[in-house]
Image (tube, helix red, strand yellow):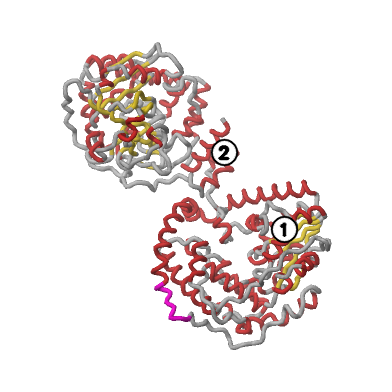
């Protein structure tokens, strides 16, 4: 098979050739010629993007999501696989690949070598074809295209190196390439002179890699390329195709751009660049559209005004005409010399600043949308550069292949986790909250009620009860099943003291002891007479972050709310390995980022809802079975007090991109506590899902430790006061001590079990950052 690589050049009819090849793809296939689809239907830019140097990020790679080396590597593997599939399926004698970026953007030996290595997998017979015209005419067209993309420098940039040795042209141009900065539109192909106008140097660079004699220049003639039969003849001659493959409709050849419009465009670009410096973002399509809107007619840009450029290449062009039979002297003859180029008057009193004032609202609107769309890509590029994020040594060892493949994609996608959400200052200690006065409830009312389910949670009960009493919970209804650590004794004594209601749930029926308990709770007076109800577990703490941190303050922040979505904030083990009889809210202060859409467990929520009869029952996360006649009465708000909309009234238990909020309340979820506590939890199973074990998958999902949040610790002082009041009871204190001893003994026992000790060591080894954890958790979900 012979491969023809059509490399351009820019503004020299490449798109017409590609359109012809695309239109004739089926006819060509019937004659053994493959014009592949997978690298790009017409312009094979995917192949170009796959081989550019990782650090040479251009507009295409930036806009199409391949800015990092890892993402580009994934693209390269995909392109090779897809191209191999097309070749294997069609078994062609000829393959044509075309992209003007091959010639105008690939400039280093490593880039050309990368392309050569890919193509050699299919054939060693590779021919390079480039359509060209005299440099000044090409430059005028290219300059205007650069202006429409955002170029800020005038043609004085090129004229400034017109006195250089022809052999130094490319090097001079490359030296002028800006340092990559996508947010400032600093791309080499937009802002720098065209290094590839040195055609002789271009040929040498390609032949140094692909071999001497592989390169052919051919003339670009607008009349030929925009004709019908004439284009067909040129394409057939360029790629040695059969003559009877038909023709394409003639089209109007592009006319030289008006010089006043070029001036206007450059002046606008200078103002657009100032807007970028003030952290505005202008999408490429909007940028071009705005410049088209300031367009005006007038005298065209004249290639004859660039005669100093023509003079540089005069001798080398003559040599190229002699060496390449398909390159005509006419195509390489410069226009008649004119006075040296000067920038034209923009005409009609044009003032760029006036247009900018009109355009700013559209730019500002686009900035918001673009910033949201590109937040992860911007952050990843700023943090890691074009090389992209790298896995830690631990992650390299632990992550499965699927997680490693997904990692770079997640880094620049909308699922990339970060902590830039909300307004609460949560990483520094604040003054303690004052004690609150207990509610005096009307006769027959039970106030704010928590219903919960427990199994072997003895050491943690008193802190949890004390904490929630301190923030305004009036009553508790707790169900237990199959406890052996003293949980029942602690709860029984609390009930004797009038603090809670306790019910044994050992005879539960159905699929879940928890749901059975919740169904039974509907018959209990403490629930029937409640003002507000929440179902939470003993490892969940309602962290109210407004006023004095009480439920009264929360309800006052959104008085018309009838349901609060309390989104989880997952707290990891915080390098605490041993079980300790100490406050959970004091030991564990590192957690998941606030923005973390995946895995699905991170943004789960529990609901505090008004007990007004709108719902018939409730489940683990929320009330259910809404009375349709009451739907209009429901206002379900997120943790920032914002309305979550209509859908959540009947479905859902997770916050989403449009509903996440933590400013007023979050549910601190200490699912692991210490590493030893995790072992015990693993051994006893889960209260809700009795058929699910808690293994390393659970640890990966729950052990978030990268962000500090001490906001709940403002409650420690008043929690200890309430806890000390409970522990003043000798019987209760003794039950608590026995439960602590049981858990210490259980931890020691599990350390002696090889299965659990291995799990313990594996858990402690799994130290991942947020992004690695997301990649790992998602891969585990897909593989399970």
Which one is closest to the eye, mark 1 or mark 2?
1
Instruction: Name the residue at the front extreme.
Output: 629
Assess whether residue 351 is covered by the magenta stretch: yes
Q: Is residue 752 left or right of residue 633?
A: right
Give how far across and how far down residue 358 sits, in percent. 40, 68
Give how far across and how far down residue 709 sits, in percent. 34, 40
Neighbour tally class for label 1: few under 14, some 14-19, many 20 plus, Cα within 10 Å: some
Q: Residue at x 72, y 55 (%)?
A: 117
Q: Are marks 1 and 2 in contact (CB under 8 Å)?
A: no
Quadrant containing the N terminus is: bottom right
Bounds of the magenta segment: 347-354
Give how far across and how far down residue 3 sits, in percent. 78, 58
Quarter of the figure with residue 116 = bottom right
Q: Residue at x 32, y 25 (%)?
A: 581
Tag on residue 397? 2
- Mark 1 — residue? 23
Residue 121 seen in the figure: yes
Quadrant containing the C terminus is: top right
Q: Circle 2 — which element? A: helix
Whether 718 is drawn above or below 226: the answer is above
The mark nearer the N terminus, 1 or 2, is 1
Whether 204 is drawn above or below 94: the answer is below
Residue 575 seen in the figure: no
Q: Is residue 548 left or right of residue 319?
A: left
């Amino acid at each position: 098979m012979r491969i023809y690589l059509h490399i351009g050049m820019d503004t020299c009819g490449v798109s017409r050739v590609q359109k012809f090849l695309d239109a004739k793809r089926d006819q060509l296939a019937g004659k053994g010629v493959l014009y592949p689809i997978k690298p790009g239907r017409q312009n094979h830019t995917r192949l170009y993007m796959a081989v550019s140097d990782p650090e040479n990020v251009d507009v295409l790679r930036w806009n199409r999501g391949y800015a990092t080396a890892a993402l580009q590597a994934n693209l390269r593997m995909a392109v090779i696989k897809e191209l191999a599939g097309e070749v294997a399926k069609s078994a062609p004698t000829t393959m044509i690949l075309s992209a003007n970026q091959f010639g105008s953007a690939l400039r280093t030996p490593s880039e050309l070598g990368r392309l050569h290595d890919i193509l050699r997998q299919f054939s060693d017979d590779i021919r390079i074809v480039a359509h060209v015209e005299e440099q000044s005419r090409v430059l005028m067209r290219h300059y205007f295209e650069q202006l429409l993309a955002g170029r800020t420098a005038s043609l004085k940039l090129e004229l400034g190196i017109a006195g250089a040795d022809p052999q130094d042209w490319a090097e001079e141009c490359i030296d002028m390439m800006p340092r990559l900065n996508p947010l400032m539109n600093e791309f080499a192909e937009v802002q720098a002179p065209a290094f590839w106008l040195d055609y002789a140097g271009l040929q040498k660079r390609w032949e140094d890699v692909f071999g001497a004699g592989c390169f052919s220049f051919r003339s670009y003639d607008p009349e030929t390329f925009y004709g019908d039969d004439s284009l067909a003849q040129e394409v057939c001659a360029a790629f040695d195709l059969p003559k009877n493959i038909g023709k394409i409709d003639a089209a109007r050849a592009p006319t030289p751009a008006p010089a006043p419009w070029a001036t206007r465009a450059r002046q606008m670009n200078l103002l657009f660049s100032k807007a970028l410096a003030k952290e505005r973002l202008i999408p490429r399509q909007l940028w071009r559209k705005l410049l088209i809107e300031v367009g005006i007619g007038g005298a065209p840009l004249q290639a004859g005004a660039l005669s100093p450029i023509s003079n540089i290449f005069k001798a080398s062009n003559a040599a190229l005409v002699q060496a390449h039979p398909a390159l005509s002297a006419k195509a390489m003859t410069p226009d008649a010399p004119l006075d040296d180029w000067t920038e034209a008057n923009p005409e009609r009193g044009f003032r760029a600043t006036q247009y900018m004032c009109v355009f700013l609202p559209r730019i500002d609107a686009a900035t918001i949308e673009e910033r949201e769309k590109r937040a992860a890509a911007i952050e990843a590029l700023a943090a890691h550069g074009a090389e992209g994020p790298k896995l830690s040594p631990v992650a390299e060892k632990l992550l499965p292949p699927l997680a490693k493949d997904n990692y770079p994609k997640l880094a620049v996608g909308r699922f990339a986790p970060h902590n830039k959400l909300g307004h609460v200052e949560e990483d520094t200690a604040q003054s303690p909250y004052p004690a609150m006065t207990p509610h005096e409830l009307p006769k027959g009312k039970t106030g704010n009620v928590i219903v919960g389910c427990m199994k072997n949670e003895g050491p943690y009960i008193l802190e949890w009860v004390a904490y929630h009493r301190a923030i305004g919970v009036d009553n508790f209804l707790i169900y237990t099943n199959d406890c052996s650590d003293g949980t029942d004794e602690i709860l029984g004594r609390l009930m004797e003291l009038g603090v809670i209601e306790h019910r044994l749930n050992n005879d539960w029926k159905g699929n879940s002891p928890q749901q059975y308990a919740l169904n039974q709770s509907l018959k209990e007076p403490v629930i029937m007479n409640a003002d507000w109800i929440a179902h939470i577990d003993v490892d969940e703490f309602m962290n109210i972050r407004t006023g004095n941190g009480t439920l009264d303050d929360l309800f006052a922040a959104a008085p018309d709310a009838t349901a609060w979505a309390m989104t989880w904030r997952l707290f990891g083990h915080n390098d605490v390995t041993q079980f300790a009889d100490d406050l959970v809210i004091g030991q564990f202060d590192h957690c998941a980022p606030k923005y973390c859409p995946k895995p699905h467990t991170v943004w789960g929520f529990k609901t505090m809802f008004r007990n007004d009869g709108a719902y018939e029952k409730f489940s683990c996360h929320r009330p259910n079975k809404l009375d349709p006649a009451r739907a209009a009465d429901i206002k379900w708000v997120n943790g920032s007090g914002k309305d979550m909309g209509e859908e959540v009234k009947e479905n859902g238990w997770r916050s989403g991109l449009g509903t996440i909020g933590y400013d007023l309340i979050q549910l601190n979820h200490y699912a692991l506590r210490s590493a030893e506590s995790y072992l015990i939890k693993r051994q006893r199973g889960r209260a809700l899902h009795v058929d699910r074990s808690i293994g390393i998958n659970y640890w990966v999902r729950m052990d978030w430790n990268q962000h500090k949040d001490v906001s709940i610790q403002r409650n420690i002082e008043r929690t200890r006061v309430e806890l000390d009041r409970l522990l003043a009871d000798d019987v209760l204190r003794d039950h608590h001590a026995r439960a602590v001893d049981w858990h210490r003994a259980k931890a020691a026992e599990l350390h002696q079990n090889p299965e659990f000790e291995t799990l313990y060591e594996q858990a402690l080894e799994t130290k991942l950052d947020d992004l690695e954890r997301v990649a790992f958790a998602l891969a585990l979900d897909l593989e399970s």
